[in-house]
Amino acid sequence: MKKLSLILIGGGDRGSCYLKYLNTCPEKFSLVGIAEPVKAKRDYLRDLYGVPDENCVEDYKELLGREKFADIVMICTQDRMHYEPAIMAIEKKYHILLEKPMSITVEECYNIYKKANENGVKGVVCHVLRYTPFYKTLKKFITDGKLGDIINIVHTEGVGNVHMSHSFVRGNWRRSEEAAPMILAKCCHDTDLLMWLIGEECVRVQSFGGLTHFCEKNKPEGAPMRCTDGCPHKDTCFYYAPSLYRIDTTEVGHFRAIVANKFNPTDEEVDRALLTSQYGRCVYSCDNDVVDHQAVTIEYKNGTVATLTMSGFNKGGRDTVIMGTKGEIHANIEEEVMSFYDFATRTTSTIYDPNDLSAIGGHRGGDEGIMADLYDYIALDKPSDSTSDLSVSCMSHLVCFAAEEARVKGTTVDMKEYVNSL
């Protein structure tokens, strides 16, 4: 078995999650280089995976400026920092694993795809939902013809109120100019998933939404600029930071590491960070400008119509209803429930058993699934039905960009005209 070597650019949450696959399949991958500006993170990953010290650096330009010394570059930086390392890696003939979104502008997304094509480079974008046992089961059920033709899909991306406050109000994705429009940053997963399930290209897009709740007009009377400055509403506010980041859940544990900017922080380290960092601010006094809710209506070439609703006012999770000519599917990945109502028998049956398809790890097994698929694609030249290469990802990204244009301008975007205008 050929062993592929990896360079990691960006040793934060997403990059470290993908690397966990190396613990279970060390015969497939080895980590040989790390570019990460935070020394504690860099050293932690260096020691965990045995990376040579001379290949552990702050700046990715130092690694990518050398002669090629690995097979794949994993680009897991912030959204606005994807483009330059992607182009540098492609020009050195590295294959790439690129965190979503590909980049924050249409032009940059297209240029990454074009450069890879010109250089004979394979690229996979991290649309990890495609690789989960849950959605693979759903895709097969549709492909086998059991649902008939898809007429409508109603899909909800529940951001979750905690995730919304952490990432899109206080966090790194709070401003469009610094990251990407929220519909792209959060929902290119979902536009990709819909396109994959339906198997058709998008022809028209409408969208509505805005920033309604997380703004100054809703700030409680007497609340300070920072939670840590003695907020009189600390016992009733859902978003009081010192309490929020003490909740004992997997999600909050993940957010704590981001707040303290280190792996496995103590309560004291989190509390210190809240005193000065963006994560200690009142959610009603932040400089956020991205939407907190948005709905998108998408028409596909075969006549299928899908509605995608993204909202920060829920527990969190994805829920999908698919209406076909032979029946109706209800699918909720967080609850691991997938059922089919059959028009012929007028009965409802379960079509996914989580006990048979155990999905452990990040994104319900998607983080591990994409790494396994990446190996087969690069080492064996065997892309699967799930493989989300750059050309496919470009199309789902375009739907997000078009949706944002439709929302801002209050129009319906014709995708053929939109693409031609670019």
Image (cartoon, rainbow, N blue to C red):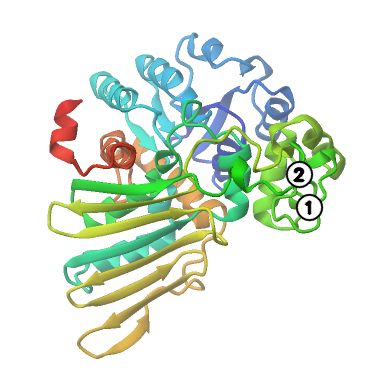
Disc marking residue 223:
2
Determine the residue positioned at 81% across, 34% down. 275
Q: Quadrant of the N terminus?
A: top left
Query: Residue 225, can we see it?
Result: yes
Frontmost residue, 164 versus 42: 164
Frontmost residue, 292 versus 81: 292
User: With respect to residue 272, does 386 lie above or below?
Assistant: below
Secondary element at tag 2:
loop
First of labels 1, 2 by sequence position: 2
User: Whole-percent x and y of residue 106?
Assistant: 31, 28
Determine the residue positioned at 21% across, 44% down. 412
User: Whole-percent x and y of residue 346?
Assistant: 26, 90
Whether label 1 touches label 2, CB < 8 Å: yes
Q: Amino acid at mark 2?
A: Ala
User: With respect to residue 40, does 377 lie above or below?
Assistant: below
Q: Which residue position holds label 1?
A: 233
Tell me the quarter of the picture where residue 147 sits: bottom left
